[in-house]
Image: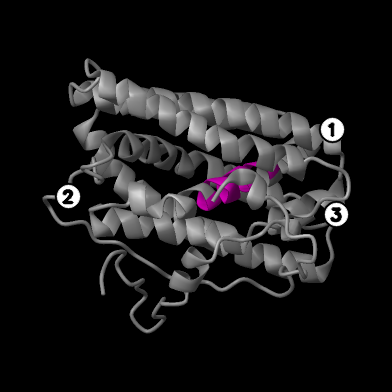
Amino acid sequence: MDAPDAVLAPDAAPATAGPLPTRRVAFAYPDDTDPMWVPRQPEFAAAANAISLGMPYAEPLFIRAVRSTFDRIDDDLRERSESYIRQETGHHTQHKRFNDLVTARYPGLRRVQAMMKANSDWVWRRSPRFRVAYAASGETISYAVARWTEAHLGEVMDRADPVPATLFLWHLAEEIEHKANTYDVFEATDGSRLRYAWSAFVGLVTIGFFTLIGALVQLHGDRRLRSPLTWWRLGRLSVSLALVLIPTLVVSSMPGHHPDDFADPVVLPAWLRGYDPATGTMPLWGSD
């Protein structure tokens, strides 16, 4: 899927009415779980792990930003935002458990986590309007990553460990599902396209920086940085992601745009319907 072919769905119907589903999912990792969970694409696994490390800082920030608007938004949006918060809480809780495995293998990542926390603290010291814009653009970045991932599933999930793969894909599928909630909160309380564009730039730069640094720490720990193939794959991954992320953020900053105008991925939302509420489980990715 090329980015220009999937940016807009001009006749898309609004898909944001009503509360979002709450899926109580918990992941158990076998003792022999390898944090480099995509053996054929270790660079992708390292980058995904680096993004995961930021979830316990970014998502609580988004939650606080949304909650701070509850006295200024209508009842329907507040109800939907409460369900959004439940989804986000599940995400960062489950990522925290996985992150403990990753940092046990690569202790140097704890310094990266400290920088991530400092960045989240810095964002929270900005104006209330900037915080909400930052949360809205951050959700757009997550949505763009979900679109990129679905377009490259056969490549990046080839022979992946099914448990971490299911964690990441469950999270990304729900990012598609709630792509518009924080954006709607932003529109209801501010709506400045300039502020949104600035927050998107700040968010993209900081996420890119932490992803790169976190990936390099892991690849250094595995003695992969001397390989030209590692650098080639990192470069290719960065360019490929940028070709989706940047156009998506530019389009989302345009006057009159709404996230429902984007053409959603198909596979991940369909797979998400396999959630079993009785057991609180998702079908393991790659299982029959």
- Which residue is the site of mark 1? 194
Which residue is more in the foreground, 72 or 153? 153
Determine if residue 1 is in view: yes
For the C terminus, the image quarter is bottom left
Q: Which mark is residue 214?
A: none
In the rendered structure, which disc, 1 or 2, sits on the residue that comes first in sequence? 2
**Location of mark 2 (residue):** 33
At horizontal 17% and vertical 50% (from top left) the residue drawn is 33
Q: Earlier in the sequence, mark 1 or mark 3?
A: 3
User: Residue 40's spot in the image, x, y percent?
Assistant: 23, 42
Range covered by the magenta-colored residues: 137-147
Separation of marks 1 and 3 at Cα, in angstroms: 16 Å
Q: Principal SS element in the magenta part?
A: helix
- Answer left or right for 189 relative to 83: right
Residue 158, percent from left and from top = 28, 52
Of tags 1 and 3, the one toward the viewer is 1
Q: Name the image quarter holding residue 86.
A: bottom right
**Which residue is pictured at 21% across the width and 36% down the height?**
104
Crowd class of label 1 (few under 14; some 14 to 19; many from 20; radius 10 Å): few
Residue 123 in the image, given as x and y percentages of width and height: 65, 30
Q: Residue at x 72, y 68 (%)?
A: 16
Q: What kind of residue is marked 3?
A: Ala
Q: In the rendered structure, are the residues bearing label 1 and label 3 in contact, judged by CB atoms less than 8 Å apart?
A: no
Extreme residue toward the top, this view:
226
Q: Name the residue beneath numbered marker 3.
A: 188
Helix or strand or loop: what does disc 1 sit on? helix
Label 1 – label 2 distance at C-alpha: 44 Å
| Image coordinates for residue 108, horizontal then vertical, percent | 28, 23
The residue type indicated by label 1 comes to Leu
Q: Are marks 1 and 2 in contact (CB under 8 Å)?
A: no
- Crowd rating for badge 3 (residues with CA inside 10 Å; few <14, some 14–19, many 20+): some
